[in-house]
Image: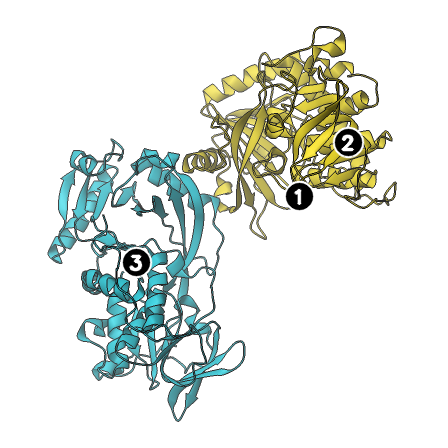
Chain colours: A yellow, B cyan
Amino acid sequence: MRTTPPPPSSPTSPSPPESGPPGACDVLVVGAGVIGLAVAWRAARRGLRVTVVAPDATPGAASGVAAGMLTPAGEAVFGEEALMRFGALSRDRYPAFVEELERDSGRHAGYRTGGTLQVAYDTDDLARLSELAELQARLGLPAERLTGRACRRLEPMLAPSVRGGVLAPDDHSVDPRLLTAALAAAARRRGAGRVRDRAARLLTSGGRAAGVLLAGGGELRAGQVVLAAGVWTPEIGGLPDGAVPPLRPVKGQLLRLRTPSGAAPVVTRTVRGLVRGTPVYLVPRDSGEVVVGATQEEMGADLNPTAGGVWELLRDAHTLVPGVGELEIAEICVGLRPGSPGNAPLLGPTALPGLHLAVGHFRHGVLFTPATGDALADVLAGEGLPAYARPFAAARGSDGSEARQWT
Amino acid sequence: MRTTPPPPSSPTSPSPPESGPPGACDVLVVGAGVIGLAVAWRAARRGLRVTVVAPDATPGAASGVAAGMLTPAGEAVFGEEALMRFGALSRDRYPAFVEELERDSGRHAGYRTGGTLQVAYDTDDLARLSELAELQARLGLPAERLTGRACRRLEPMLAPSVRGGVLAPDDHSVDPRLLTAALAAAARRRGAGRVRDRAARLLTSGGRAAGVLLAGGGELRAGQVVLAAGVWTPEIGGLPDGAVPPLRPVKGQLLRLRTPSGAAPVVTRTVRGLVRGTPVYLVPRDSGEVVVGATQEEMGADLNPTAGGVWELLRDAHTLVPGVGELEIAEICVGLRPGSPGNAPLLGPTALPGLHLAVGHFRHGVLFTPATGDALADVLAGEGLPAYARPFAAARGSDGSEARQWT
């Protein structure tokens, strides 16, 4: 299923010590999830001196939990066409992005092709899926309607009761944990520094962002600062009033299941289902892991898995693919998606010169990673926010209008 | 709900160093689950010099996983009346056993009274429950039939669909993890030694059991040896042919759930249910923990929780008590019950003089702990197997007939 062979290349630049004395640099990226690391890597590739600052691990950080579906078509929601177009653009950049990433990092990113099969359990589910397919067609996203039997030809372990489906042949998946590790390695090999501490406070100087104060003491100075710390971004002290939107944690529970040794895979591509109106997905990995997700709960920063959440995931996954019952439970994960007021990302310059955002990716952080990395690299290189990212400009100042303010 | 107040007593004997040089002792107990530790403590109370030998932790050991129901009535199965009588006797010893244990150990054993409510979900379940109630009545186990409404008066969070139930007022519960810790402390305070290693091989001398060879090297010598190592007992080398029955691991998955702070308990006593023919139970603890169990799977020594096992437990618990969905998942546990060929324990002397068994307790180890501890202490003190334990004599030689041989 993989399209990219094991990367043969040696590093394209010598690896500097991972967290040597950073001194003043061009760009300081706050956050080491897929977004922060992609921004750092893409900026470093442009020759900028970059430092990434983030603690070693943050419980609930979305990049370590996400399933990694690259499915703008599957995510299509009425009224979110702009998001879907941004997602389709980012998805289309994935093959080249992964190729460069694996070459720069010397690591696999866990990218799998094979498309995504969306299936419906009952007639109401099928009606909803048909509406979605029409929307996808209108937006030019390829999607092929299939009978229940045709779905089972593609995925033989689907339940006989599955009524029909839609194949999105270009919607693939990536393993966010492998992707994160590859991005970190690629950024390092491209010369980016890494400081394993929490950015406690933004520093300003002469009306510009100038760096951060570290929780562990000391400062990091830089000409430009990118905030990409997910739902924790607003906790950084000293942010100018209204520069950063309120971000709410949207709790997601998901399961990492394991195929017993010798058993056949239960699904061979991403399967998204509607089961009596409830969405559920199964994302397979080369390792035999199957990720089943996800709840979507407005519960604040709660990291506890619940009996109800896990039961609903297992119930719906089992309804679509009864063989799921034989899989082993490797992990129950809880992540906090960073939801902005409009559930869309905020990208690029803020009203404070030198301060940029790459936040609010909500459910789409992994999908949006290539486009976000490239857009921010453009900004950091002085080229401004590219057209495709302007619907999500952190400050409207980037297209000449009044700066957006969050109060 | 607790009947025993916090034990005020100081230790009844000075604590020796936990694992000082054991030298030769009277009794060597192989195994440190509830059975091995109860035997050690009860024998030490009789003035015998006892050493317990077992590794620090054994993944899948039943005592760390068991729910701790003391429900011979709930367990009533046609054809197992002898087991049920032994269970009722052991259950009736629990209050005094716990009182002595808490006094000797200075620790709580997590004993809760309040009885057990058995409930039926549909009319078929109710018919099965009625048959069980008749059997219980015939065996003299108190059991009061209740309407669905009466069940909900006792346990208000039961689903409205529950059809009826049976209250077993004398069937209580204990926390096996607290019980294990208390037994270990009590045995130590009563002078028992503890060697944290695996007994690799039985040693014999002059046609008698004489001690064990340790996996880490060295020997432990004793006049009598008790094997109480659960399903791992037959792995000890050097056992005389036919002395120990084959023991098969019977996999059980269960869930430890946690009541969110401030929330009301979902059940106030043990609730056992039949849901469309499938048994499920919920056992509450003073700490707010609720144990939901258990699968019963003949899968060999497999310690992997499965999606199907967890899903069925959550489904059935949620059907009986919908509020379970709000509980947090603290732990998914997998234990291996030691099943003998007849699913009954094997107690007391074997054909090899000085070698005794306390194995094969299957699903009933915690329930059978007081009776087994007392029976083996009688044997070790030279009084022979007491009458109540003779149906489970490891060797029929104990009542004069031919020794039982396992081949």
Q: Secondary structure at mark 3?
A: loop
Between B117 and B289, the residue placed more toward the observer is B289
Q: Amino acid at mark 2?
A: Arg
Dot label at residue A221: 2
Q: Amino acid at mark 3?
A: Ala
Mark toward the viewer: 3 or 2: 2
- Indicate the position of residue A362 as horizontal and vertical percent values: 60, 25
Is A81 positioned to the left or the right of A101 in the image?
left
Quickly name the residue at label 3. Answer: B109
Dot label at residue A244: none
Q: Amino acid at mark 1?
A: Asp
Q: Chain of mark 3?
A: B
The residues tagged by marks 1 and 3 sit, at their Cα atoms, a distance apart of 47 Å
Q: Residue at x 20, y 46 (%)?
A: B129
Query: In the orientation shown, which residue stands out farthest toward the top?
Result: A401
Between A277 and A251, the residue placed more toward the observer is A251
Between A179 and A360, the residue placed more toward the observer is A360
Residue A20 appears anywhere in the view = yes
